[in-house]
Structure formats: structure tokens, C-alpha cells
Image: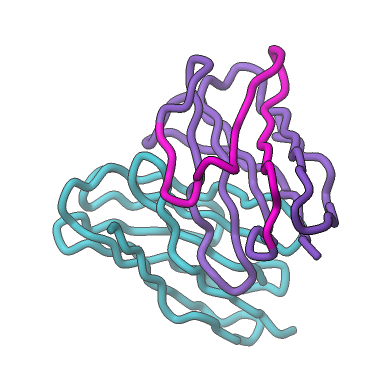
Amino acid sequence: ILNVEQSPQSLHVQEGDSTNFTCSFPSSNFYALHWYRWETAKSPEALFVMTLNGDEKKKGQISATLNTKEGYSYLYIKGSQPEDSATYLCATSEKLVFGKGTKLTVNP
Amino acid sequence: EPEVTQTPSHQVTQMGQEVILRCVPISNHLYFYWYRQILGQKVEFLVSFYNNEISEKSEIFDDQFSVERPDGSNFTLKIRSTKLEDSAMYFCASSAQQGAGGYTFGSGTRLTVV
């Protein structure tokens, strides 16, 4: 059974702090790694899809890296804002196997 | 920006009743999916649908579940005889390609079985 783990489960930071969290996945038969941002009562919003080892992607103050050989991806948020508060989900494989998410709260 | 639309946003049903959850995927997408999230647990894959048939389903997707694309725009999930443990948020998603491309999710239907 494909298992995707995310850590930490939740995170509280102050506005302006930079933060990062981890997604771990099996490195064998890697297909693609997706990051989503999910606010309560809204649709999960696609942030990144990464396929190549060493990939780095950036969207505004959010960036992500991928290591397929060791099976992990990091998501970084530089200078967090209250509006970055959300649950960040990662998923892999063809049918999207999700981690449990990291719930980020940015305090003003 | 194109959206995946799900209705209703919240459905309450009695145990044993049938429910149909509706989704309108993005019009030029070819792959359609249902996921669910039981409160406090991971988002779980239920089924994928391509070319008018199920392409893959999980162990959760047993005989009480079915999917249909009755016309060119809707994609439905039917739960025949609901159980208490079917209470969850159900998400529909669609994509132009499978796996490596982006998936667009709807905002979900919260199903409560009482």
C-alpha cells in the first residue's frame, strides 16, 4: 500500500516568519508529486506538480523541491501572511494518494 | 478560470437511503475522479473514470457505489444504501491527463448519514 506522510501535522507561525514542511513518499515507481493548498469550505487549489528529481518550483512566496531518489519533497513559504493559513496537502501516484496534510496557521 | 462544480454542498440523509452526488467537471477534461475525506483522516481515492468507463477503483468503492456520466457534462456518484460510515466530504476532480498533469477539484459535498 502506497503511504504518503506529511510533517508536521500542524504548525503555528507569526506573520513574517518563513516556514517549511515535508512530504515523504515511496521512492520506487515514482510518478509525480502534487502539492495542494486547501482552505476550509473551498476547493483544494493546485500549487505544483513535479516530476523530475531535483525539480524546484516557485509560485510567489511559495516554493517546493523534490528528491525522488530519497522520496521527499519540501514546501517552503517565505514571509508567511495570515492569508497563507490553510492545509497543505501532497499527493503522488497516478490516482493521487494523499498525505494527511499540514495545517498552517499564520498569526497576525 | 474554469471550475469543477459540485452539488449539493451539504447533504443529510438517513441510513439506508440512496444518495446521488453531482459534479460538473471542466469541459475539455477527459479524466474524472471521486475522492472522499472522513473527518480527521486522509483524502482517499475512490474511483477514476475515462472514456465512459471506470479505469481504476479502490477497495472502498464496493458494490454500493457507482458512477455515471449521464450526459456530456455531469459526472455523478451514487451511493445505493448509505451507512453511517459513509459520512464524509466527497470531492470530485477532473484532469486533462492522468497523473503528471494538474487536477482541478470541486469544493466538495459534505455527506452526513444519520
- The residue located at (41%, 71%) in the rendering is A6
Instruction: Tell me which chain appears purple.
Output: B
- The residue located at (65%, 79%) in the rendering is A105
- The residue located at (50%, 45%) in the rendering is B61
Q: Which residues are magenta?
A: B56-83
Q: Quadrant of the N terminus of chain A?
A: bottom left
Q: Quadrant of the C terminus of chain A?
A: bottom right
User: Would residue A45 be seen by someone viewing this image from the given angle?
Assistant: yes
Q: A37 and A76: which one is in front?
A: A37
Q: A82 and A67: which one is in front?
A: A67
User: Would residue B1 be seen by someone viewing this image from the given angle?
Assistant: no
Height in image: B50 above or below B111?
above
Is B62 left or right of A4, judged from the image as shown?
right
Q: Position of residue B14 (x, y in %)?
A: 83, 57
Membership of B43 in magenta stretch? no
Q: Colour of chain A?
A: cyan
**Colour mapping used in the image:** by chain
